[in-house]
Amino acid sequence: MMKDVSMMRPMSLALLTSAALLVAGCATERPDPAGLRAQSDGRMGGGTALPPMPGGGTAGTNGRLAPGGPAIGSCNPEAARYLIGEIANVETVEAAKAATGAETVRVLYPNQPVTQEFVSGRLNMETDNANRVTQVRCG
């Protein structure tokens, strides 16, 4: 008994089309409607001049801060309060990291889903729709 080849071709074409659509749907990036998110690789331009860091710490030769700055791995959000109102860009993130002693800085955007685990050496910078820092906190 021979199968009808004319029926197999439309089914194969339909399966291939469905698979292509599924793969294409997984590959799309969620658009940034305002184009405001800070980029970690420096693509976000327009950095603003920031006031001097509280504590006056400077980078030491071993990667830690020289005396007068916070210890790496600590998190002192009060030291980054001066960044509230600034644009969240690479320079702001680095300034917050240096001022607070945080190991990492996480920029949080409005309505962004975030994990809820507490990481003691992480500084969270919350932003508004204009990408301005609205709050800094540890965790």
Image: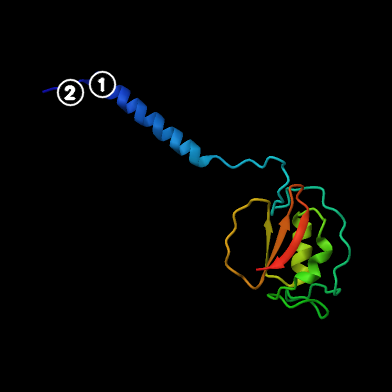
Residue labelled with disc 2? 3
Q: Residue furthest left?
A: 1
Give residue 128's position: percent from left, percent from top: 74, 51
C-alpha gap between disc 2 and disc 1:
9 Å
Q: Residue furthest front?
A: 111
Tell me the SS state at disc 2. Answer: loop
Q: Residue at x 17, y 23 (%)?
A: 3
In front here: 124 or 62? Answer: 124
- Give the total number of marks visible in the rendering: 2
Q: Quadrant of residue 113?
A: bottom right
Q: Say whether residue 60 is left or right of residue 40.
A: right
Q: Residue at x 75, y 70 (%)?
A: 77
Dot 2 crowding, Cα within 10 Å, few <14, some 14–19, many 20+: few
In front here: 42 or 114? Answer: 114
Residue 22, numbered label: none
Dot 1 crowding, Cα within 10 Å, few <14, some 14–19, many 20+: few
Residue 23, compared with residue 137, is above or below; it is above
> Which amino acid type is shown beneath numbered disc 1?
Met
Colour mapping: rainbow
> Which amino acid type is shown beneath numbered disc 2?
Lys
Give residue 41's position: percent from left, percent from top: 69, 53
Q: Residue at x 75, y 50 (%)?
A: 131
Give residue 53's position: percent from left, percent from top: 85, 68
Residue 7, numbered label: 1
Give the quadrant of the N terminus. Answer: top left
